[in-house]
Amino acid sequence: MAVSRSPLTRGLTYEFVLILAASLILVCTTVGLEYHQQAAGAARLSSIGQQFHLGYENNFAAWFSGSLLALICLHALDGVTANRTERPGVARAWAMIGGVMIYLSADELGWLHERISLLGRAIGVGNWGLILPLGAFFAAVLGWALLRLWIAGGAHRRQVLLMLCGFAVLGSVVMQEFLEHNLSWDGALALAARVGFEEGSELSGMLFVLASAMANTRTLLQDTSPQRRPVFAILSDQRGRLVLALVVLAPVLTLVTMHMYSVYRGRPGDWLAAMTFSACAAIMFGRWLEAQNNPTRLFACALFLLLSCACVAIDPGNLFQTDFMDTTKRAMVIVPLLLVTIGLNWRLGLMVTQPLPMVAIPGLCLGLLLPETRPTVILLTVALGATTYWALSVKPETRAARDGLAKA
């Protein structure tokens, strides 16, 4: 990705370099941990080591990969914002790409295609009976979208070429998994190198697609007209529909999570909870990109990302027991961190005071602190994230009007 000299778009360069560095560190860490595990003959890594191994589920590394795909979705949807009026066909193409990316994010953290494979086996069509039609559908969607962007010409063609490189690298992972199961890998170093190459290929493919999609956000930041739309505008423009989608999806994905539940399988319900807090982080980061003069927004973004990661890395059933109360480890991390984050945002004027969220959030925090079943913990976590997102995603013009009324 070319380094931009524009003061505002420079923030995108920082974003890409930070993600690239984190990806390299995770791949190197995964190779080291895999080598240690194989050389020591250990069945599994320590609980701390598992958090940074890209081959494990429900950990920091898996959250990073899933969140990266969700971030690509947001940058792709900036293409909808930038082209909706003048090029509706291009806008539809980016909407379709964004839809595929958010599904891949859910699949990365929620173990979706594995569950679909098991469902296919249960109904008698085999492991691939449902996977192949689903894959063909998404391939057709991506193919149409890329063709539409190519026909649009200009800078869109460069974006298509980057995405083709990215999807080609991601597609190579399927062949790598075939070789994994059909070749003999002797020695700890060979096994570690294979795992590192496979996981590195996944992240490399994502980075190509990210570089392509970020051009949409750069276009918005370089627009100097009075009608310029904000970065990640979908999070404020469609806040009602997004919250409605959360209400509908939360019980469905919680049921899917509890079916065939295992600590070694991804949890779709927790992916949904993580995405609510990631949306809050994106709102803070987008507002920083708009001006890049308020580092407290970056700090708030980092706190929301910690909350998002906690939804994935901490099992909803892990108990925290003391002499005076029983609760879950997730509640002991999320509740105080969320209250501190909300208090900071409100104190710095980054969050508008709204009666309903200000009443609902403490009540949901209290409910989460009580000893609950796994499904209840998942639903309460989603509700907390959704309520926080609702309070934070007020449109800039609405916030300005409310601030003016408050001062009056």
Image (spheres, rainbow, N blue to C red):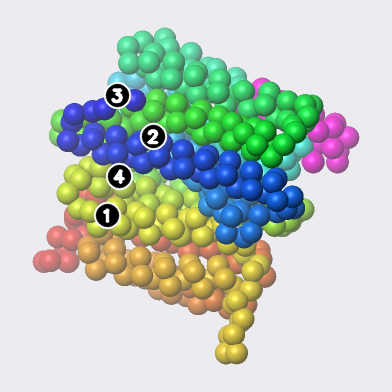
Mark 4, other Cα within 10 Å: few <14 / some 14–19 / many ≥20: many
Secondary structure category for the residue under label 1: helix
Range covered by the magenta-colored residues: 118-138
Amino acid type assigned to the residue bearing label 2 in the image: His
Amino acid type assigned to the residue bearing label 1 in the image: Arg
Disc nearer the start of the sequence (1/3)? 3
Amino acid type assigned to the residue bearing label 3 in the image: Ala
Secondary structure category for the residue under label 3: loop
> Is residue 265 positioned above or below 379 on the image?
above
Q: Which of the two discs, 3 and 4, sits closer to the camera?
A: 3
Q: CA distance from mark 3 to mark 4?
A: 20 Å
Q: Is residue 55 left or right of residue 122?
A: left
Rendered-image quadrant of the C terminus: bottom left
Disc nearer the start of the sequence (4/1)? 4
Q: Which residue is mark 2?
A: 75
Q: CA distance from mark 1 to mark 2?
A: 19 Å
Name the mark on residue 2.
3
Mark 3, other Cα within 10 Å: few <14 / some 14–19 / many ≥20: few
Amino acid type assigned to the residue bearing label 4 in the image: Gly
Residue 125: horizontal and vertical position, in percent?
A: 85, 31
Q: CA distance from mark 2 to mark 4?
A: 11 Å
Residue at 36 percent across and 70 percent down: it is 340
Could you tell me if the residues under marks 2 and 3 are in contact, i.e. CB atoms within 8 Å? Answer: no
Q: Which residue is mark 4?
A: 286
Q: Is residue 172 left or right of residue 29?
A: right
Q: CA distance from mark 2 to mark 3?
A: 16 Å
Q: Which residue is mark 1?
A: 297
Residue 160: horizontal and vertical position, in percent?
A: 43, 17
Residue 169: horizontal and vertical position, in percent?
A: 55, 23
